[in-house]
Amino acid sequence: INVDPDLADYSFDRAIICDRARTVDLLLANNFHFENNCAVLSVEGYPRGPFETVKKMLKRNPRLEVFALHDASEEGCKLAWRLANDRNWFQGQATVTDVGLRPCHEKPFRGLFLKSKTLVKVGQGITEDEAKWLSRYTLELAAIRPEQILKRMFRAINKKLEKTAADGKDDSGATVDSGSGGGSSDGGSGELGEHPERPREAALEQDLESFGSDASDSD
């Protein structure tokens, strides 16, 4: 893939990080990145040409919102946790929203499961119930129609934007000053993180609805 020499000058406030290169290809082929002003990368470094340039650009943006899109697999269900906790990704910088498939989405896809090849352990974003299911099965995002993936991803991004806009206004509709430019009352130097205005506990969120029970429908 040829890299646009002006790519580093672009600004994306949103990024979709996928567990599979083919999911990246689906989004890029349908111009999802252009229509929604978001970067699209795989966690393993795809597309190889622009990957490092885009990743560095994203890591410089303190307003970045990240979405993890993935299979219901061990690595997929760990993806959002990895992005939120890995210094090489977005630890301390951005809120990561998990919008991918998880075992709780399995009902409409019965008959499409694949057999799991590993014994999955609890941790890194995987609960005990999820570990039991993932030790038996996996469910690929490819089980969903491509147009539905695009539709659900669009829904997830816009739902997040609406929530962020609502959280940023007071009851009168005025934008609330986050106070990110000020120091702490005890004269601290912000040692807790590169972007201390982002609460640590808000670094990882789950959106279980956008790819919920009707995600296999063709509406």
Image (cartoon, helix red, strand yellow):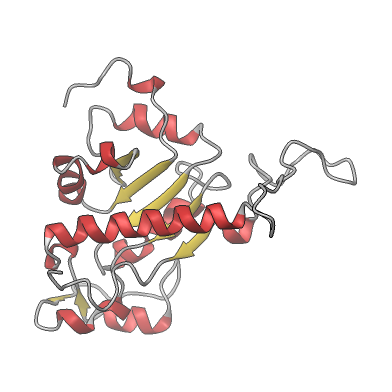
* Quadrant of the drawing holding the N terminus: top left
Q: How many marks?
A: 0
Up the image or down, 157 lies above or below 1; here it is: below
Q: Nearer the viewer, residue 171 or 41?
A: 171
Relative vertical location of residue 196 with respect to residue 80 in this rendering, above or below:
above
Whether residue 156 sits left or right of residue 135 in the image: it is: right
The single residue placed furthest to the top in the displayed view is: 5
Q: Nearer the viewer, residue 219 or 138?
A: 219
Q: Residue at x 29, y 15 (%)?
A: 5
Q: Position of residue 211 (x, y in %)?
A: 28, 68
- Whole-percent x and y of residue 186? 90, 46
In the figure, 36 relative to 207: above or below? above
Q: Give the left or right position of residue 146, taking residue 99 as reference.
A: left
Quarter occupied by the C terminus: bottom left
Residue at 26%, 68% in the rendered image: 73
Q: Is residue 45 among the parts visible in the rendering? A: no
Q: Which residue is at 38% across, 75% downward?
A: 121
Residue 35 is drawn in which quadrant?
top left
Q: Is residue 46 visible?
A: yes
- Image quadrant where residue 33 sits: top left
The residue at the far left in this view is 111
- Rendering coords of residue 214 (x, y %): 23, 76
Residue drawn at (17%, 66%), measured in percent from left and top?
Answer: 140
Location of residue 179 in the rendering, given as x and y in whole percent from the top left corner? 75, 43
Q: Nearer the viewer, residue 136 or 103?
A: 103
Give the residue furthest to the front.
172
